[in-house]
Amino acid sequence: MKLTRLLLGLFLPPVGVFMTVGVGPTLIINILLTLLGWLPGSIHALWVITKHDERLNREERTL
């Protein structure tokens, strides 16, 4: 699933962000960045996806 989200974040940034965090301010920011250009939207999407996964891994280790 992570690979799918990363590929979507690279090619369709808002879809990858939506699959990761759902609807919220992060998705709106990503849509605006994608409208400014594909590269800023993709960079933001990849950053959001990797940080979300890091946070989940950190929470699993503490439990």
Image (cartoon, rainbow, N blue to C red):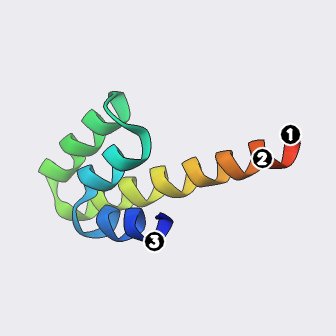
Q: Residue at x 25, y 64 (%)?
A: 39
Gap in angstroms between the C-alphas marked 2 and 1: 5 Å
Q: Residue at x 32, y 44 (%)?
A: 18
Tell me which amino acid carries mark 2: Glu
Up the image or down, 8 lies above or below 32; here it is: below
Reading the image, the residue beneath label 2 is: 60
Gap in angstroms between the C-alphas marked 3 and 2: 20 Å
Up the image or down, 53 lies above or below 7; here it is: above
Whole-percent x, y for residue 16 in the image: 33, 55
Q: Residue at x 37, y 55 (%)?
A: 45
Numbered circle sitting on residue 47: none
Badge 3 marks a residue whose secondary structure is helix
Q: Is residue 19 left or right of residue 34?
A: right
Nearer-the-camera pick, 3 or 49: 3
Say few, some or many: other residues with alpha carbon within 10 Å of mark 1 (under 14 / 14 to 19 / 20 or more): few
Quadrant including the C terminus: top right
Whole-percent x, y for residue 11 in the image: 24, 69
Numbered circle sitting on residue 63: 1
Nearer-the-camera pick, 9 or 44: 9
Reading the image, the residue beneath label 3 is: 3
Tell me which amino acid carries mark 1: Leu
Q: Is residue 47 left or right of residue 17?
A: right
